[in-house]
Image: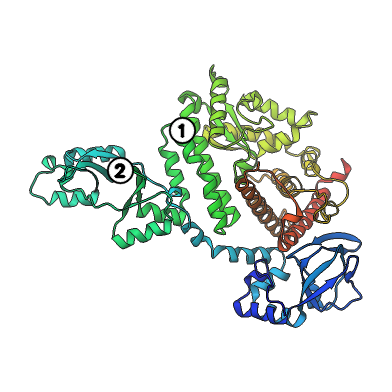
């Protein structure tokens, strides 16, 4: 029997050692020439097939719904039922492992997660995947390097400085320790450390603190690590030497100080350390340094199996703090007080994770004039680019006068978007509907939104026109017909945003507008619509699951693109997905199709 069965792919990766041995002991190998019908409704389904070589096409009711390749499996549900409703055909020479029905049934009975991944609905399968990922979270965070943690900048004082003067300097800077530069008894330069713990010992000495030099109480037997040291090793060093802080040295240079508190904070929730750097940033350059750490945070959280909505919430909060801090660093105080800085679109909803583009705007109080506003806007958007937020290709930024207007101007523009014929108007309106205030007078945004809601109120025709944008990216034929082509040939890509998340986001946005829902996030809007009985609870649950899966899949591929040095985009090929991912994608898109049918009926879109 073969012994090289791969257990690196779902659902077989969740089997125990004993269950894996059961597979190895019972699996066989089958060979199918090109054109062979491997399984059809008149055949008994006796084995699950795991492809070693070749490709198998899956048809349901005459429609191609999948093409399986190496490491993919098929036939699981058919084997349990004993029969299939599908026709599976070898597109080329196929060699596959054959797992017998008895073994499959035993695995299902003994391993609930295996069963969930194989047969459950979308919600349960996503839960099973999440449970498998969460166990890796602590380990993945511990495998990062010291350079990725929060290293406090060194603050040096001379060894002759008296304790009172030093404490005054520490208080002024909000610090609890200082590095002491001194010359030792042997005449060699040395570096020590003074902490608030040493202050306690200093106060017990007979010498008054104002006459006591810091060299007399500082400790010079310091432990050092390098920026490349793994965080776990740094923690072990602190425990081994019973110290709470270590120097971080890069060669002869002292980079800073790593404290045990900061290290543990990084492991438990290191996002707040970035927030601390943002808050303390005194220059645009310091703020940009903090902002550029967010992608690393995202990668660590994703690798650790943290839920996609949790990552999105953390990143959204950090981004808001960055935008607010940057605006206050660049804009004159009067402008900050008499305007409202907005983030919009996915950033406004709290659903943009990686920095894909800028969607921002500024509402200025009526009657307030700032002659330098265009220059301020230019500096702001350029500085955001330096923080890692690429400029918006559609120019939805402060540098565009359309998105930088007095309140009265915005009200007029909103009416033009709603009632005019500009082809970009529906999308501009949708982007603005998701606006969130991050700095300045939030009342200006409230007034603009109230004006927009008033224009929509009671107009079924305008609501239907707005909702119809859900069909903006629809294409003739079925999405699966376009995607299921044999690997190795010219393969079309699927746009995870246009054909995946956008119909969900915009459809829910339209329902929220119709029902006066004030929440901005799609999941929050779903929850509120369900609570008001404006959306079927089962459909809402499925839509939430589908959105989470698509957001996670998009993030996974974007991170891979970053790692390969490629431009981040939303397109994915089926050949880049595993069997489980393709099944989840298929289920998600079926849910979206059902939702669009609901929207067509609800808003009577066929009558437009």
Q: Residue at x 80, y 48 (%)?
A: 492
CA separation in Å, label 1 and label 2: 22 Å
Q: Is residue 282 above or below residue 225?
A: above
Label for residue 175? 2
Q: Position of residue 496 (x, y in %)?
A: 72, 49
Callout 1–callout 2 Cβ contact below 8 Å: no
Q: Would you place residue 607 above or below residue 488 in this image?
A: above
- Element carrying mark 1: helix
**Relative to 25, is 63 on the left or the right?**
right
Residue toward you, 289 or 174: 289
Give left or right: position of 431 versus 179. right
Image location (x, y in percent) of residue 413 = 69, 27
Neighbor class of circle 2 (other Cα within 10 Å; few <14, some 14-19, many 20+) is: some
Viewport quadrant of the C terminus: top right
Mark 1 highlights which residue? 285
Farthest residue to the top: give it. Answer: 371
Mark 1 packing: few (<14 Cα in 10 Å), some, or many (20+)? few
Q: Residue furthest left?
A: 206
- Label 1 or label 2, whichever comes before in sequence order: 2
- Give the position of the N terminus as an image quadrant: bottom right
> Which quadrant of the structure image shows residue 230?
bottom left
Percent x, y for residue 198? 20, 50
- Identify the residue shown where x is 92% and y is 75%: 42
Q: Between residues 195 and 29, which one lies in front from this camera angle?
A: 29
């Amino acid at each position: 029997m073969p012994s090289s069965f791969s257990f690196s792919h779902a659902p077989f990766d969740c089997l125990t050692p004993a269950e894996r041995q059961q597979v190895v002991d019972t699996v066989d190998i089958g060979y199918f020439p090109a054109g062979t019908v491997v399984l059809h409704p008149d055949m008994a389904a006796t084995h699950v097939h795991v492809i070693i070589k070749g490709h198998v096409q899956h048809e349901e009711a005459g429609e191609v719904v999948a093409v399986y390749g190496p490491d993919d499996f098929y036939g699981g549900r058919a084997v349990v039922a004993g029969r299939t409703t599908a026709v599976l055909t070898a597109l080329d020479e196929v060699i596959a492992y054959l797992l017998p029905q008895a073994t499959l049934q035993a695995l299902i009975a003994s391993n609930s997660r295996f069963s969930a991944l194989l047969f459950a609905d979308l919600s349960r399968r996503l839960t099973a995947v999440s449970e498998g990922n969460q166990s890796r979270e602590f380990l993945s965070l511990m495998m990062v390097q010291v350079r990725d943690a929060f290293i406090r900048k060194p603050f040096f004082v001379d060894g002759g400085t008296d304790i009172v003067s030093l404490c005054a300097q520490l208080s002024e800077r909000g610090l609890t320790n200082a590095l002491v530069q001194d010359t030792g008894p042997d005449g060699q330069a040395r570096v020590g450390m003074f902490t608030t713990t040493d202050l306690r010992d200093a106060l017990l000495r007979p010498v008054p603190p104002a006459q006591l030099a810091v060299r007399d109480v500082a400790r010079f037997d310091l432990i050092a690590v390098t920026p490349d040291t793994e965080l776990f090793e740094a923690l072990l060093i602190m425990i081994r030497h019973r110290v709470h802080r270590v120097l971080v040295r890069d060669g002869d240079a002292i980079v800073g100080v790593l404290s045990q508190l900061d290290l543990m904070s990084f492991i438990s929730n290191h996002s707040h350390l970035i927030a601390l750097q943002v808050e303390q940033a005194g220059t645009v350059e310091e703020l940009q340094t903090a902002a550029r750490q967010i992608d690393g945070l995202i990668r660590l959280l994703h690798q650790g199996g943290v839920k996609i909505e949790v990552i999105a919430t953390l990143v959204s909060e950090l981004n808001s703090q960055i935008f607010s801090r940057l605006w206050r660093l660049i804009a004159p105080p009067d402008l900050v007080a008499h305007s409202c800085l907005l983030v919009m679109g996915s950033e406004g909803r709290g659903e943009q994770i990686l920095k894909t583009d800028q969607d921002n705007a500024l509402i200025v109080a009526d009657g307030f004039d700032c002659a330098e506003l265009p220059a301020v806007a230019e500096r702001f958007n350029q500085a955001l680019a330096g923080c890692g937020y690429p400029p918006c290709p559609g120019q939805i930024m402060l540098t565009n006068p359309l998105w930088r207007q007095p309140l009265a101007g915005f009200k007029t523009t909103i009416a033009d978007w709603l009632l005019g014929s500009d082809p970009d108007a529906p999308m501009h309106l949708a982007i603005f509907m998701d606006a969130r205030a991050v700095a300045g007078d939030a009342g200006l945004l409230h007034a603009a939104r109230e004006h927009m809601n008033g224009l929509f109120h009671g107009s079924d025709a305008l609501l239907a026109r707005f909702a119809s944008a859900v069909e903006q990216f629809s294409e003739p034929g079925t999405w699966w017909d376009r995607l299921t082509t044999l690997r190795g040939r010219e393969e079309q890509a699927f746009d995870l945003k246009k054909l995946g998340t956008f119909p969900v986001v915009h459809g829910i946005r339209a329902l929220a507008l119709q029902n006066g829902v004030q929440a901005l996030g799609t999941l929050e809007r779903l929850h509120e619509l369900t609570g008001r009985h404006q959306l079927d609870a089962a459909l809402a649950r499925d839509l939430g699951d589908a959105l989470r899966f698509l957001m996670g899949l998009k993030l996974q591929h974007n991170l891979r693109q970053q790692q390969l040095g490629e431009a981040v985009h939303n397109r994915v090929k089926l050949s880049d997905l595993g069997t489980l991912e393709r099944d989840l994608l298929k289920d998600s898109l079926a849910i979206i199709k059902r939702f669009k049918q609901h929207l067509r009926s609800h808003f009577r879109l066929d009558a437009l």
